[in-house]
Image: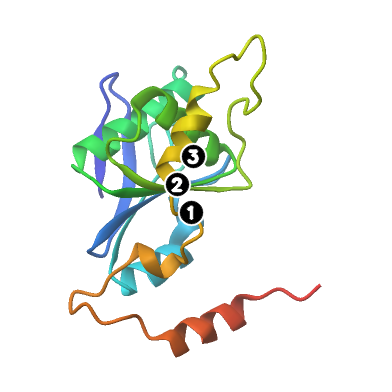
Amino acid sequence: MNAFTTKDGTQIYYKDWGTGKPVVFSHGWPLSAAAWESQMVFLAANYCRCIAHDRRGHGRSTQPCNGNDMDTYADDLSELIEALDLNGVTLVGHSAGGGEVARYIGRHGTKRVARVVLVSAVPPLMLQTHANPACGWRIRVQAAIGNWNKPWQSLCQRPDHRSIDQDQVRRIEAESRCEY
């Protein structure tokens, strides 16, 4: 079982699959790393290193009575990234995981971050107000995503530098479309 212990003694479980550019997934409440398995299998097969952790109080991680707040979640994410010595990371956060990613950037900056993906996220306040004059995390997110409109294929690169099979990509995209 992959796990590390945070500075306050909480054990954080994580999955670490594949090799290549790192993609770190942060799940929504009350889910776990298992929520990202389909995406991880696909990206790991396409030359990405995929890491997903169970946030403290979730899944296989320790269930502490303290530290269940966005600041601590962001600090735990920072400790995971540092423990695995990840650089050029793509951070993907869904729901509360998006808030965790946004808070991570606000507290720890973008030194190790290449891209950010917020999916139906619950980030901190995005509006600049008298109570939130700097809106600093938003500026850092905008800097981190820079080329946000590049397709997911830019996340991964095959070791032989050939492009990913575009026919396979189109098949997967077609199969994953929802009809309303």
Is 134 situated left or right of 66 in this image? right
Type of amino acid at the residue the image marks with label 3: Gln
- Give the labeled residue for mark 1: 148
Quadrant holding the C terminus: bottom right
- Badge 3 marks a residue whose secondary structure is helix
Residues at badges 3 and 1 in contact (C-beta under 8 Å)? no
Q: What is the number of callouts on the image?
A: 3
Query: Closest to the observer: 160 or 172?
Result: 160
- Give the labeled residue for mark 2: 145
Type of amino acid at the residue the image marks with label 2: Ile
Residue farthest toward the right in the current orientation of the protein: 180
- Badge 1 marks a residue whose secondary structure is loop
Occupied quadrant, residue 130: top right
Measured Cα–Cα span from mark 1 to mark 2: 5 Å
Occupied quadrant, residue 54: top left
Residue 10 disc label: none
Measured Cα–Cα span from mark 3 to mark 1: 9 Å
Residues at badges 2 and 3 in contact (C-beta under 8 Å)? yes
- Badge 2 marks a residue whose secondary structure is helix
Type of amino acid at the residue the image marks with label 1: Trp
- Residue at the spot 46% in from the left edge and 64% down from the top edge: 39
- Residue at the spot 44% in from the left edge and 25% down from the top edge: 106
Question: Visible in this render: residue 64?
Answer: no
Residue 142 disc label: 3
Q: Position of residue 21 (x, y in %)?
A: 27, 59
Residues at badges 1 and 2 in contact (C-beta under 8 Å)? yes
Q: Position of residue 104 (x, y in %)?
A: 41, 30
Query: Closest to the observer: 83 or 68?
Result: 83
